[in-house]
Image (cartoon, rainbow, N blue to C red):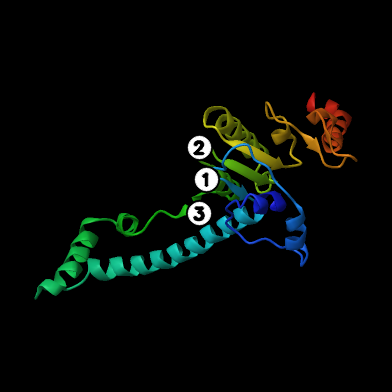
């Protein structure tokens, strides 16, 4: 996926590990395209998602710290003995009046953005994918199932199908998830086959392992 992305000069959000010979190998590779690649196109990897989640956490920590400061500010302003003496005092007077008109929680909400930590890691990962996709883009997705629950995988699968069908997007996806492998119209390359071969998703070794496992426990589901 990284080779394809680099040859197509696709945008990426995070750096990736590469050996000393990567660029030399890249020079031996060629790519042909039938149309101009949209500037919206990009590669989306697990590292991108993890960085996005970590950035949200860092933002939340800053928000939490600011919230504590605003709690103290509210109490100071609510009970302040204050007299307007000049125009420079006007902003302070506004805060005092605001504190006296509102409850502590409302005062803090008005001064501070909502904490984005209300979303789980899976919800944040899903949000990352849909925020990065635009019309007519080419998107390389490297194991998008990481950090996503089965329910979220199905939701993202539907979003990808709709993006391809209605918004002119194209996708190259590296995955072991049976959910993404079932996408309508997908052409599946089995990279474990020698030589690489096109197969139905039900013929893939890892999918058959899921099937065999659930067949063994079939009676437990039917009780």
Whole-percent x, y for residue 48 in the image: 61, 55
Point out which mark residue 117 bears.
3
Question: Are circles 1 and 2 on residues that touch, CB within 8 Å?
Answer: yes
Number of numbered markers:
3
Q: Is residue 134 left or right of residue 20?
A: left
The reply to whether residue 156 is visible in this rendering is: no
Whole-percent x, y for residue 103 in the image: 28, 56
Q: Provide the residue designation for mark 2.
A: 135
Q: Residue furthest bottom?
A: 85
CA separation, marks 3 and 2? Answer: 28 Å
Hey, which quadrant is residue 137 in on the image?
A: top right
The crowd level at tag 3 (other Cα within 10 Å; few <14, some 14-19, many 20+) is: some
Q: Is residue 189 above or below residue 59?
A: above
The crowd level at tag 2 (other Cα within 10 Å; few <14, some 14-19, many 20+) is: some
Pick whichever, 16 or 98, lies toward us: 16
Q: Provide the residue designation for mark 1.
A: 40
Hey, which quadrant is residue 22 in on the image?
A: bottom right
Whole-percent x, y for residue 90 in the image: 14, 68
CA separation, marks 3 and 1? Answer: 28 Å
Tag 2 or tag 3, which sits nearer the N-term? Answer: 3
Quarter of the rendering occupied by the C terminus: top right
Tag 1 or tag 3, which sits nearer the N-term? Answer: 1
Question: Are circles 3 and 2 on residues that touch, CB within 8 Å?
Answer: no
């Amino acid at each position: 996926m990284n080779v394809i992305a680099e040859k197509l000069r696709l945008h990426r959000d995070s750096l990736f590990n590469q050996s000393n010979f990567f660029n030399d190998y890249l020079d031996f590779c060629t790519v042909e395209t039938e149309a101009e690649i949209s500037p919206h196109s990009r590669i989306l990897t697990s590292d991108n998602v993890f960085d996005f989640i970590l950035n949200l956490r860092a933002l939340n920590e800053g928000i939490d710290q600011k919230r504590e400061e605003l709690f103290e500010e509210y109490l100071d302003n609510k009970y302040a003995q204050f007299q307007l003496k000049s125009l420079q005092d006007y902003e302070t007077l506004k805060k005092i009046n605001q504190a006296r008109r509102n409850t502590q929680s409302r005062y803090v909400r008005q001064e501070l953005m909502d904490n984005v930590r209300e979303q789980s890691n899976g919800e944040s990962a899903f949000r990352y994918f849909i925020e990065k996709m635009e019309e007519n883009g080419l998107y390389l997705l490297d194991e998008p199932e990481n950090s996503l629950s089965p329910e979220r995988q199905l939701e993202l699968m539907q979003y990808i199908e709709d993006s391809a069908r209605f918004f002119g997007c194209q996708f190259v996806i590296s995955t072991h998830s049976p959910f993404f492998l079932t996408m309508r119209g997908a052409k599946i390359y089995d990279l474990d086959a020698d030589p690489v071969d096109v197969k139905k998703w039900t013929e893939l070794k890892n999918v058959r392992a899921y099937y065999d496992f659930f067949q063994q426990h079939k009676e437990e589901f039917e009780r």
